[in-house]
Image (spheres, grey):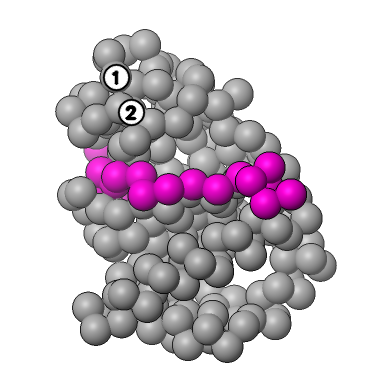
Amino acid sequence: MPIAGKGMLLTSMDVDPEHEEDFNRWYDREHLEERVAIDGFIEARRYVAEDGAPKYLFLYSTQSIEVLDSPAYRNRLANPTEWSKTTMARFKNMLRAVARITISRGKGRGAVLGIVRIRPPGGGHDTLREALRAALDPHFADGVVSAHLIESDPALSGPTAEIRNAAGAGAGDWFVLIDATDITPAETAMRRVTDNIALKPMIISIGVYRLLWDIAKADIS
């Protein structure tokens, strides 16, 4: 299982250029470590877009999806630092997905992440999941190290009382994540999904992101 744990928080957003330096400093000097320190959080990864929107993307792995509705996490949301209050108020085009990791194939993390956002129909989730499992073969292309599916929980995703500027639309969307060593293999693996005639109507967006850095619980314990 290349992704530790069974739960994931995915966030993505833009920020105006005049605030970007402080935004990046906040993530690097406070926010990622603060989140990973919460009970049940395992690691966090920070990305910037090579081709896609919003510009910034973050993945937080947790022991289970329940961690993302736990008292420890809710307490942190309800008691942000002053720096957090200022920075979060500047988020634009924010996406917030609380998800279960339902497929994870391969080993390791790549320097590049391909992402495909899918809006599943009302039924047939088991059939769709199995179709994606077949497509998410990390051995399909050299340079692909692992491939994953995360399925958002509509009740937990989207805006919260503390994070009001997250988009509410698509709170039940799924995300295909491709960990690769470079852009070309990531794009090759993504086409296994995007070129599938049956899946095309469900695709909302695609993107390719470059890893900036990551931090694990072991780094701060």
Numbered tag placed on residue 180 in the rendering = 2
Q: Secondary structure at mark 2?
A: strand
- Front in this rendered view, residue 66 or 168: 66
Q: Which residue is mark 1?
A: 143
Q: Residue at x 67, y 51 (%)?
A: 220
- Provide residue 8's location: percent of width, then percent of height: 58, 48
Please, which residue is most extreme toward the right here? 71
Residue 119 visible from this viewpoint: no
Instruction: Say whether residue 213 is left or right of residue 75.
Output: left
Query: In the figure, 30 relative to 22: above or below?
Result: above
- Provide residue 139's location: percent of width, then percent of height: 36, 11
Q: Which residues are magenta?
A: 200-221
Q: Residue at x 57, y 33 (%)?
A: 3
Q: Residue at x 53, y 74 (%)?
A: 159
Image label count: 2
Do the CB atoms of the residues marked 2 and 1 lie less than 8 Å apart? yes
Snapshot quadrant of residue 146: top left
- Provide residue 99's location: percent of width, then percent of height: 58, 49
- Front in this rendered view, residue 4 or 206: 4
